[in-house]
Amino acid sequence: MEGLNTGDISFLIFSTALVMFMVPGLALFYGGLVKSKNVLSTIMHSYAALFIISIQWIVIGYSLTFSSDIKGIIGDLNWAFLNNFDFFTANAKYADSVPHLLFVIFQMMFAIITIAVVSGSFAERMRFPAFLVFALLWSTLVYDPIAHWVWSSSGWLNRLGVLDFAGGNVVEINSGVSGLVTALFLGKRKRTKPEPHHIPMAILGGGILWFGWFGFNAGSALHANGVAVVALLNTNTSAAAGAIGWVICEWLITKKPTVLGAMGGAIAGLVAITQGAGFVTPMAAIPIGLIGGIASYFAIGFMKVKLGYDDALDAFGCHGIGGIWGAIATGIFATTLVNKNGNNGLLYGNPGLLGVHLLAIFSCALYAGVMTFLILKVMSLFMKIRTDKDQESVGLDVSLHGEEAYNGFNI
């Protein structure tokens, strides 16, 4: 146990639990936004991600992401089945003051929440068996390689100097672009107008996400130190600014600020700060969140309508657009005054960081988009992916799962 820090261990255990708590938060947020006849099927996607990826991660996922490098592209299988490393000593490359196994568990929660976010794009129209296969394949072939590129000490984007504190590329851009491709592949639902059946449920879920995001971002410091404190404050600041940005847009355009819109803006602000949470100042978190909320508002309210794609719960409009802006913003606002292990961005005399981040955005988006399409295409040769019209009419809760959320109630 030499070299381990009990404060860091306690901090990371708590942060891991917070990130796991984001799964039921996302389930409630997504569940409240769909029709009442599809709420359970939508919630099931988030929980199924927890079930499946918890096993996939310890069998092969962690090894593919963090073990010995294969030409900067993917890890090997040296740590598959959690073999060949000591659970109780630290891995100095990644987290030098906590047991290696704790780092494994913390990173597992990121893999879980990412595929859960993707599920929002195809809510109300993917068959459950297809989701199970898709979640396993996507996490293995898309999430794990991109996480290796960015977070592995030998990943090619990491070596180029990309700064991604808590998953702007790995979680947000990755899930947003993959969600968009999946929505386009499956096609539109019969009715695409938003029909949230339980807004208070969605608001509660959004609040839980905000709470869990403190573990997501601050925990990514991997130490109970000053950088974690800055990341904590930046997370809250950007969320607040994102909500303000969205509400201002609603007020100016529709004259009616909405509670659901405010929560959507807050989540957009959380997405936007994820990449730079431990690299930028709290004052920089204000424009990062504000612009994130405004950008997501226009992406969801105008771009999606104009282009006509059916991203059911706006995985791309929130996570994709917010993540892209967050990556750009980190390239602009990052400073070693906050984190000596980071780098300076454009505003601090280093335009090169922004250039590297633009390359990372393009590379991660392209890979995620192409691989997601190929996974779906191959799956479609062997199984039916989309629900049929009768199943959509009855609702996926009854037609796929044989249960109703509100039996005997008119909601």
Image (cartoon, rainbow, N blue to C red):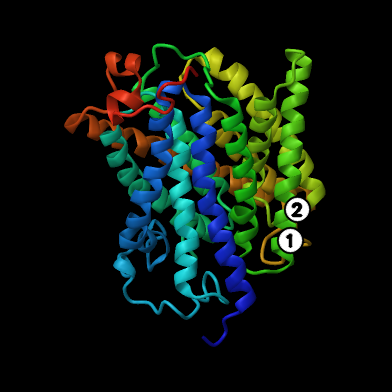
Asked whether 135 or 292 is in front, the reply is 135
Where residue 37 appears, as percent x and y from the top left, is 40, 21
Residue 79 versus residue 98: which sits nearer the camera? 98
What's the residue at 75%, 35% (across, down)?
A: 290
Q: Where is residue 304 in the image (x, y as percent from the top left)?
A: 54, 19
The residue tagged 1 is: 229
Task: Decide if residue 388 is on the left or right side of residue 335.
Answer: left
**The residue under label 1 is which amino acid type?**
Val
Q: Total marks drawn?
A: 2
Question: What residue sits 45% from the left and 65% below the top?
Answer: 104
Per the image, the residue denoted by label 2 is 233
282 versus 313 height, above or below: below
Looking at the rendered structure, the secondary structure element under dot 2 is helix
Q: How crowded is mark 1: few (under 14 residues within 10 Å), some or many (20 or more)?
A: some
Residue 48 in sight here: yes
The answer to which image quadrant residue 129 occupies is: top left
CA gap, disc 1 to disc 2?
A: 6 Å
Furthest residue in direction front, as rendered: 408
* Relative to 381, 153 lies left or right: right
- In the picture as drawn, the residue positioned furthest to the left comes out as 382
Residue 146 spot, x, y in % from top left:
44, 50
Location of residue 252 by image quarter = top right
